[in-house]
Image (cartoon, rainbow, N blue to C red):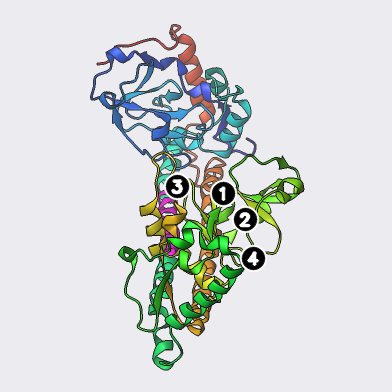
Amino acid sequence: MSDLPQTWTDCRLGDVVDYGLTRKCEPVDILGDSWVLELEDIEKGTSRLLDRQTFAQRQSKSTKNCFDAGDVLYGKLRPYLNKVLIADQPGYCTTEIVPLKAEAHLDARYLFYWLKHPTFLAYVEAESHGLNMPRLGTDTGRAAPFVFAPRPEQTRIADKLDAVLARVDACRNRLNRIPAILKRFRQSVLAAATSGALTEDLRDANPHSGTGADQITRDLEAKTTLLQSAPALAKKKSSSNSGIDTEYVFPIPESWNFTSWGALSEWITYGFTRPMPSAPSGVKLVTARDVLNFSLRLAEAGFTTGEAYADLSDKDRPRRGDLLITKDGTIGRAAIVATDEPFCINQSVAVCWLRSTSMDREYLELVANADFTQTFVQEKAKGMAIQHLSITDFAQAPVPVPPPAEQAEIVRRVETLFAFADRLEARYTAARAQVEKLTPSLLAKAFRGELVPQDPNDEPASELLARIRVNVASQPKRGRGRKTAAS
């Protein structure tokens, strides 16, 4: 690095850290209550210790590296190259974690922070090798760049970074709570919207504005008319088994009533089960991953051929106004189709035909994504490894029905409140992006010598480095990676 303070010097990591001190240990020599560290125990980026397990819990059969309290540990295996930790007690770790011992000439925290510096991270990213699991070898680790500051200044820098990065972490932790708060806010809005609490004032001001029962009656008449022209739909299980599961009903206003998705819909079914050809262009093929809460990610869906699409039945080709809901794997995400673009769905997506109802589709989308529907879906799910939602079960999920005017007002108010949450979320995203820039910026400043003032009385790092090299040259050669018994 250029433009360093006069008392600093550039060198290599191997000049100040002795990799030869790494000790190996076999599992038979490790006591059951000893700490055994694996790469997954260190949180990437934050260096937070996620778990501390003993050998008795791990029962690993592989050779381990030994480390002491105060050693700096970093993962040499991609994608864990920026996992780094200062050991607060002795223990053992996988050989993919390299223990670095900070001796008297080096503050362990200064070394720890350098291993997070953009210059070091760029080096190990460029120098890691291997096709399947690229890693940073010991030799390339020794050759890594290092910025060596006078010993007292190392401690001043580490103290300052400890203080300012603790504040950054506290800020990040507070920001991390915001997504959960916004999620609870949105769900509270949905709960109020679908229980009548959100529009209580509207009913008080307009006590004779109709009932949900009137809406249900009109929809039943419209559905009956449609089924007369398509009698096969009346025999579908989702229609014939459309009673309300009363276990999941809840208090609603007197002017509201309950129906079920099966009673509301002409057909609840799911997409094709046979293999479909993929194509670089053609007709969009929607799978469960393309159905999100309140939105259909059609632009990112794959394609099938126009010929294959033409051979599909109507059940595989949803239309504007139908409800899609994921039924396999991550179940319950629901969105109303709001496009006239033709597309098809596979068996991971269920479709609820809403061809005859006059209910507000956006209101129905709120109901499908509300907590009570999601609870119903999760509790009715079947399967151990991969969960599945039965369409006949979903047909019995309750749907609270307000009068038509109230449906429209509910949608308007929810949109207003969700827009407010969206603005907060955008501000959170911007703030989080700024916070994530702080740590590398502070580290860059620290290792340019700009974070704390230099003391002219400090011994220059070049003189300290010269003594280290003389001392190393005078020492007998050590065996690399020697084994040791657990104490």
Frontmost of labels 4 and 1 is 4
Q: Are dots 4 and 3 in contact, CB under 8 Å?
A: no
* Quarter of the rendering occupied by the N terminus: top right
Q: Estimate the x, y position of residue 172 in percent, counting from the top left.
A: 44, 54
Looking at the rendered image, the disc whose residue lies closer to the viewer, 1 or 3, is: 3
Q: Secondary structure at mark 2?
A: loop
In the rendered image, residue 468, in percent from the top left (x then y), is placed at: 47, 20
Image location of residue 225, percent across then percent down: 57, 74
- Dot 1 surroundings within 10 Å: few (below 14), some, or many (20 or more)? some
Q: Amino acid at mark 1?
A: Arg
Front position in the image: 88 or 198: 198
Label 2 to label 4, Cα distance in Å? 14 Å
Q: Which residues are magenta?
A: 165-183
- The foreground one among 476 and 296 is 296
Specify whether residue 178 is painted magenta. Answer: yes
Residue that label 4 marks? 320
Residue that carries the numbered disc 1 in the rendered image: 289
Q: Is residue 408 left or right of residue 107?
A: right
Residue picked out by circle 2: 297
Q: Looking at numbered disc 2 in the image, what kind of residue is underneath it?
A: Arg
Magenta part mainly helix, strand or loop? helix
Task: Point out the tag, 1 or 2, that comes first from the N-terminus.
Answer: 1
Query: Residues at badges 3 and 2 in contact (C-beta under 8 Å)?
Result: no
Task: Place residue 487 in its image quadrant.
Answer: top left
**Residue under pointer 3:** 388
Q: CA distance from mark 3 to mark 2?
A: 21 Å
For the residue pair 5 and 21, the one nearer the viewer reads as 21
Q: Are marks 2 and 4 in contact (CB under 8 Å)?
A: no
